[in-house]
Amino acid sequence: MKKFFAAVIALGLIVSGCSKSENNKERKPSKNIDSSSWVDNLIDGKAAAQKENKKIFLFISSDDDEKSASLKENLFFTEEFLSKITEEYVPVNLDFSSSRFEQAQTGENSELKQIVEENLKDLTLYNVEGSPSFYCLSKEGFFISKLELENDVTLEKLEMALASKSEEFAVYENVLKSTSEGKKEEKLDAIQRLFEITPVEYHHLLSSKAQEFVALDKNNETGNAGTYVMNLANSKAVEAFINQDPKTASDEFAKAAEHKYLLPEQKQQCYYTAGYLLAQSGTDDMAVVVQLLQKAFDAAPESLYAPQIQQMITIMQNTGAEQPSDAQSE
């Protein structure tokens, strides 16, 4: 697998002009999406998948690596493959080839430039590290599974790989379906189960389900509402950070820290993360950073992390320029 994350991010900064987006509203799906072939972005892919009630087969590629190019030529773009995969999936190909970036950079095709920028955000959202990579997503774009395919991928090998995950997929789909059916308690249990079976690095994709949990459990009868308040803050912060707006990312955690259902150590984590992100934003107002760190310490002074936070407060008060460590920043 070719590691290309840093390279495409660098190219993406060139495309976006190294500035914060003026308009971060999500583009509406295109009209007349052709899902019988590869869709080149996830906004259209999710729209087609929801309309057709199919999962998404996500293929991350770059023609700058030989395996991606070979897969496209010999398998993925053949009629045989497309007729088979589209029985259950909408195929989405996020292409990070340098030629595509160069074409977008010219500015002659504004739609391509916008799609390239969208795809760069998805590269981060799905924690993509290299190409080729293969993912199975729900119709909403939630992470279900990542496929590990060896060299010389054939249609038969791919079918076998998908078949080996059929039980896993069935469990996931049943849990996801249950989040929207039954009594309130059953929905809450299903949402918690959905988070349990989803790797933590993809929890931010489940923000809509976290929002549903907080709305259903408005009196915190489960005792877990605070966890989903934090998830919502993290999801919003991830989006803000991708949009090159660390100040807003910090604000999301500071706001979440004030929620009445957070436990003391959860408040501490939120305040600390708010301070950490604000410091990383390049702010000149280190007094505010120190205030957030002090609130983090005060929230749970007996916690495991409290001594580290106190030490960081002292350092920043003395120097006014030090950056927070990575403790609790995840």
Image (cartoon, rainbow, N blue to C red):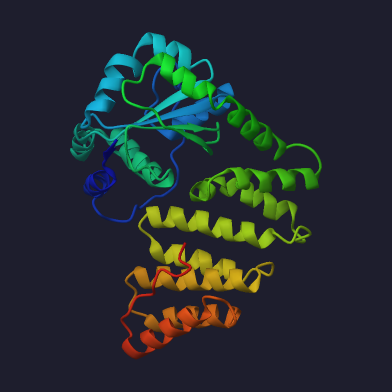
Query: Image check: 53 left or right of 95?
Result: right
| Residue lying farthest to the right in this orientation | 183
Camera sees residue 34: no
- The image shows residue 244, relative to residue 288, as above or below, that is above
Residue 116 pos. (x, y %): 31, 38
Q: Residue, x 25% and y 33% (percent of image)?
A: 109
Residue 51 pos. (x, y %): 57, 24
| Residue lying farthest to the top in this orientation | 80
Query: Image check: 130 left or right of 140?
Result: left
- The image shows residue 205, relative to residue 165, as above or below, that is below
Camera sees residue 268: yes
| Observer-nearest of 203 and 139 | 203
- The image shows residue 222, relative to residue 134, as above or below, that is below
**Quarter-wise, where is residue 232 in the image?**
bottom right
Q: Residue, x 33% and y 42% (percent of image)?
A: 117
Q: What quarter of the picture does the N terminus occupy? A: top left
